[in-house]
Amino acid sequence: MSLFAAASRLVFLGLFVMSGSSAWALDLDWHGQFRAEENVIYGFTNGVSAPANNNGGYTIPNSGDSPATFQNLFLRLNPRVLVNDNVTVHTDLWVGTPDQSFFGSDGRSTGTRSYYSTTTGNAAISAHTLFAEVATDFGTVRVGRLPLNWGLGLVWNSKDDGTDRLPSSGDGISMTTKLGAFSVSPAIIKYVDQNNNPGALAAPNYNAGVTDYTISLTYKNDDEQVDLGILFLRRIAGINSNVLSPFTVTSDSATTQTVNTYSYAYNIWDFYAKKRAGVFTISAEVPLVNGTVSGIDYSTVAGAVKAVAKAGEHWSFSADIGSASGQTNGQNGATPGDFSAFSFSPDYRPGFILFNYNLYNIAVASGSPYNDPVTNAKFLALGAKYTTGKWSHAFQGLYALADQTADGVAGNIYFNSRDGHYETEDGSPAQSNKLGFELDYGLGYQWDESIRFGLETGLYFPGAYYDFNNTPTPNTHSTVFASNFNVLVKF
């Protein structure tokens, strides 16, 4: 019997016993989702082959696999056990993963997202969330593997709406106390420091991993139709942490990069506001960051604003604008004395191609094809949606600029925001800040209340930013076309 079959029978047998035995006297509530997708991407490479060293700028090598075609298959099961009036156990069981479960593949995680999310690891069925919720006289206590979401989802993002790929979660305990229109929620969150890989077991490292100490205050007034919130997050990583971060490498050589052993400790003050006024809804989130990373100062700011307006029964219009700081250059071969780069949660996806598909990972068959977060970028997306009956049509235009670029001075150092490491410039032309623009169209058909069919397509016109490959001869690129056909079943 396969591991998948054995694990499946064990889970379902346990749930059947809990729900069916009068001795347990427990209620079991089920819901979940199933989705299958087909992806096709043309024209995403911009180089003939991989560069001879690791200082190749933003080359996407031609692997001979254009168009790229791959499928996703994912099942999420959310049984909820009602123990009594005060205690509920919530689970979010994954059969496969939403970003790497390919047809003909085991869909196991590579662990490259572990700095912002926790899963069971290389298992046929994994637990994205698994926690008990207890109602007390002081508030609602949650303990276990918790879903994490805040504001628009720049830092924590867990939508669970059928479009999520890399939702946030972490192991810990939280308590939420409501005082009228106010809610206060302190929490301690621990992220996994390595995959639970039976073939590579190691002794625990008690000075590793990432821990968040958080407290949030929210205000919600339905009469005034306003929501306000502030999240304070203290993030600490041990000096031998195996958890990846958006900045993992701080030196380079002609043939290899050296990963530093480092710790970090920084604060995030994350402000959120939402206002509804008639047909208009506007939301904003602004994280402010300060602290240290690997012994140097870390200070940065990011932000996003979303506005939606309904025009009659069928039309709605939207605007999405955001900014994530990049890292400044180093002069004369010296790395900068501080760090300023910020990375959105990868589940914040303003575009269908840009900030969604990781085209480099697709070309080199490395990592998740969907892990392309907003970083070192400023963007503006304008959209319109027309809904009639069971049909929906969505249109969007997206334009983006880079925050920091290579200055073209030989011997200076710039930060490659795609790979997360510094590279030494060879004196090639200065890099443009134009990331490019794209046009997207989405067609949806709601068959019934449970089944939805969708088709998304996009044309991405890469900007001159991607010409830069750290050689005198720039990359060449063409228009990227992508499509995704999907079936979503909710139950």
Image (tube, rainbow, N blue to C red):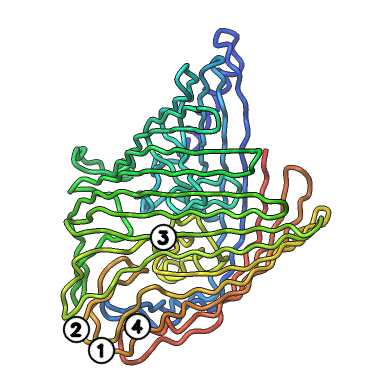
Q: Horizontal and vertical percent for residue 263? A: 20, 51
Q: Is residue 47 visible?
A: no
Alpha carbon distance from label 4 to label 3:
27 Å
Q: In which quarter of the image is the C terminus?
A: top right
Q: Which of marks 4 and 1 is in front?
A: 1
Label of residue 78 in the image: none
| Among the two numbered marks 4 and 1 on one chain, the one whose residue lies closer to the N terminus | 1
Q: Residue visible at 65% across and 58% down?
A: 308
The three-letter code of the residue at mark 3 reads Ala
Label of residue 427 in the image: 1
Q: Horizontal and vertical percent for residue 77? A: 57, 36
The three-letter code of the residue at mark 2 reads Gly
**Are there few (<14), some (14-19), or many (20+) residues within 10 Å of tag 1?**
some
Q: Which of 49 and 309 is in front in this view?
A: 309
Alpha carbon distance from label 1 to label 3:
31 Å
The three-letter code of the residue at mark 4 reads Asn
Alpha carbon distance from label 1 to label 2:
7 Å
The residue tagged 4 is 469
Q: Nearer the viewer, mark 1 or mark 3?
A: 3
Residue 238 left/right relative to 419: left
Q: Which of 350 and 20 is in front in this view?
A: 350
Residue pushed farthest front?
Answer: 224
**Are there few (<14), some (14-19), or many (20+) residues within 10 Å of tag 3?**
many
The residue tagged 2 is 411
Residue 244 left/right relative to 374: left
